[in-house]
Image (spheres, grey):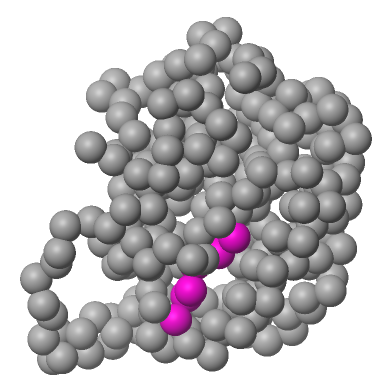
């Protein structure tokens, strides 16, 4: 197995690490955890994270790809498209083209590249079921590009465990800390890091049944607390990316967090 020494993460809020930590203490996320997995095999690995929340695929390509190539990674992760997919103006062909440009450029630079498919959002947030067809189509496009450019894929869509509400934050769009642990473990398996297998796909212990009344309360809170404000921002032409910069724009040594684990015990 190659001993990676320069890891670059490109993407949006999921790669930035939202809901795994906070903006006061610092967000962590699956990419930081992936860097720690790489550091376990090579302690001198350096890591940069160019991801910024709220960015669409073309914005990730325009603002992160050249910077990533300049840092000469030997391994890179690219996750993009979710912020496109949830918009009424979604253009599947445009997102595919942006992903292809990033995959092709990074692979031609000599980097190993990994990406992921997206889970069935309708099982995470029932009100998002109308987006299911888009998700399935985008995932197939990602798989096709991955085959074409020899990109490793964490294929989340087929596994029911990744739609368990207990690994998702209350906004239903981002993983929580447990979810980020599972994504990092899945990425480690995808690129063949030693000690990782399909444990990230295994179900959590059975949850207590939830009454219909309680489910309705959860859905109502989601509409009021997350979906409603998101619509307001769109109407006002605002984005969560406004004023944001990458949290880790330069390669730097990886500090393994205290109590670091894969979250799969």
Whether residue 145 sits left or right of residue 84 in the image: it is right
Closest to the observer, 24 or 159? 159
Total marks in image:
0
Q: Residue at x 84, y 52 (%)?
A: 148
Query: Is residue 65 among what the camera can see?
Result: yes
Query: Is residue 243 among what the camera can see?
Result: no
- Image quadrant in which you'd find residue 92: bottom right
- The prevailing secondary structure element of the residues shown in magenta is loop
Closest to the observer, 249 or 188? 188
In the depicted structure, whether residue 70 falls above or below residue 145: above
Whether residue 66 sits left or right of residue 156 in the image: it is right
Which corner quadrant holds the N terminus?
Answer: top right
Confirm whether the magenta stretch covers residue 176: no
Q: Which residues are magenta?
A: 117-122
Q: Position of residue 106 (x, y in %)?
A: 83, 37
Q: Residue at x 51, y 9 (%)?
A: 43
Whether residue 80 sits left or right of residue 206 in the image: it is right
Q: Residue at x 69, y 35 (%)?
A: 76
Which corner quadrant holds the C terminus?
Answer: top left
In the depicted structure, whether residue 124 falls above or below residue 189: below
């Amino acid at each position: 197995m190659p001993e990676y020494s320069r890891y670059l993460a490109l993407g949006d809020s999921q790669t930035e690490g939202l809901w795994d930590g906070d903006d006061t203490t610092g967000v962590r996320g699956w990419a930081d955890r992936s860097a720690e997995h790489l550091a376990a095999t090579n302690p001198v690995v350096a890591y940069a994270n160019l991801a910024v929340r709220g960015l669409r695929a073309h914005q990730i390509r325009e603002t992160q790809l050249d910077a990533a190539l300049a840092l000469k990674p030997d391994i890179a992760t690219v996750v993009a498209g979710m912020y496109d997919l949830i918009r009424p103006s979604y253009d599947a062909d445009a997102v595919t083209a942006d992903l292809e440009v990033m995959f092709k450029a990074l692979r031609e630079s000599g980097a190993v590249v990994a990406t992921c498919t997206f889970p069935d959002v309708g099982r995470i947030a029932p009100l998002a079921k109308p987006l299911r067809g888009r998700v399935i189509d985008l995932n197939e496009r990602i798989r096709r590009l991955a085959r074409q450019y020899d990109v490793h894929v964490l294929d989340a869509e087929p596994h029911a465990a990744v739609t368990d509400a207990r690994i998702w934050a209350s906004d239903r769009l981002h993983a929580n800390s447990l979810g980020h642990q599972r994504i990092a473990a899945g990425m480690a398996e995808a690129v063949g890091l030693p000690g990782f297998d399909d444990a990230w796909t295994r179900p959590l212990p059975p949850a207590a049944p939830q009454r219909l009344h309680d489910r309705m309360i959860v859905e109502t809170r989601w509409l009021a607390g997350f979906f409603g404000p998101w619509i307001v921002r769109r109407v006002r032409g605002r984005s969560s990316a406004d004023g944001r910069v990458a949290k880790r724009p330069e390669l730097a040594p990886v500090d393994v967090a205290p109590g670091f684990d894969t979250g799969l015990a």
